[in-house]
Image (cartoon, rainbow, N blue to C red):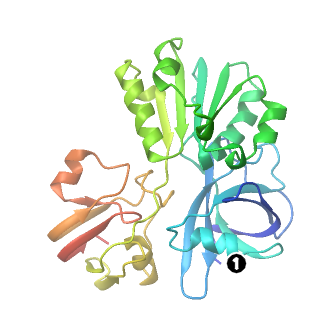
Amino acid sequence: MSAQTITVEITSIAQVTPLIKHFRLKATTGGYLPAFSGGSHIIVVMRGQKRIHRNPYSLLSSPNRLEHYEIAVRRMDESRGGSHFLHDVVKIGDQLEIAHPVNLFGLEKQARKHILIAGGIGITPFLAQLEDLRCGEVPYELHYSVRSHEHAAFLQHLGTREATRVSMYYDNEGATLNFEELLAKQPLGTHVYVCGPAGMITRVIDTARSYGWPNSHVHWEQFNAPPVGDAFDVFLARSKISVHVVPDQSLLECIEAAGVEVPYLCRGGVCGFCHTRVLELDGELLHHDHYLSANERTTGKSIMPCVSRAKAKRLVLDL
């Protein structure tokens, strides 16, 4: 076990929708887990028979109840193995390793109002945020869009605690969230937060910008899963190691498997912590992150190895 991880035991597993399972974790040593705030995530380390998966999941439990953590995992059809491992392999009593909580999606303390927009599994970071908001005096509202009632995770929890502040939208009933109407007339100082499918996030960002919202008032979270791609080779200049990147593993995972450590916080193309300099490139970088600017991508001098790949005859990294 890495000194940077905590060993936890699975104490309960519940199927909350046809595609989502809810897991409760406690420290194997007993006592409290590290403190966190609403919007935080952890990296869950899953050691399979053939490979290690390290996936980010939002903490949905109350920041005031540190005797356990809770996460929810959606089974992905095109999973590289992480969601299938948790859905099909892990059982109550099993042990996993987790990294300490990191918050890249925290609530803005100076906001005069909070608008939370969730789509599907994107509800998870907001459940902990609601615990923080409930104790404050700043007005807030949650807008939650799902395909149908059976896919509305934690609806009973929300109905009990947030009945007057939650608006539900069910696709199968033709109820859609009007982003223009929602964002057009909010009071000055309002912040909007969105987590869900890529299309929803893009709509919220574009709509907010069209109505003149400052970029600092628009927040989103979307951890990209590393895509499958063609195999390629990379040379790590400082380590003097050649690494072969296979189709179904990320560049970061293959570098780690070769014994070279790369710093990270999210492993989803968001935080920028694994930003790596490209020293030589004969080919094309395939960027899948949310961190690099369009200009940085054009120069071909940077890559986020957690989610991005290459289609190149030669790639040399400053590692």
Q: Quadrant of residue 111?
A: top right
Q: Quadrant of residue 123?
A: top right
Residue drawn at point x = 71 percent, y = 34 percent: 130
Name the one closer to the observer, 192 or 135: 192
Label 1, secondary structure: give it: helix
Q: Is 186 situated left or right of 243 in this image?
A: right
Q: What percent of the width, then of the height, locates residue 85?
A: 64, 74
Q: What percent of the width, then of the height, locates residue 39?
A: 62, 43
Where 91 sits versus 186, above or below? below
Name the one closer to the observer, 51 or 120: 120
Number of dots carrying numbers: 1
Where 286 sits versus 189, above or below? below
Residue drawn at point x = 77 percent, y = 29 percent: 162
Name the one closer to the observer, 196 or 152: 152
Q: What percent of the width, then of the height, locates residue 34?
A: 73, 54
Residue drawn at point x = 45 percent, y = 51 percent: 271
| Residue 120 makes an appearance in the image | yes
Q: Residues within 10 Å of mark 1 (few under 14, many from 20)?
A: few
Q: Is 62 situated left or right of 303 in this image?
A: right
Residue denoted by label 1: 89
Extreme-left residue of the structure: 282
Extreme-bottom residue of the structure: 49
Please, what is the three-letter code of the amino acid marked with disc 1? Val
| Residue 2 makes an appearance in the image | no
Where 166 sits versus 155, above or below? above
Q: Quadrant of the N terminus?
A: bottom right
Residue drawn at point x = 76 percent, y = 22 percent: 164
Extreme-front residue of the structure: 173
Q: Is 203 situated left or right of 175 in this image?
A: left
Q: Quadrant of the C terminus?
A: bottom left
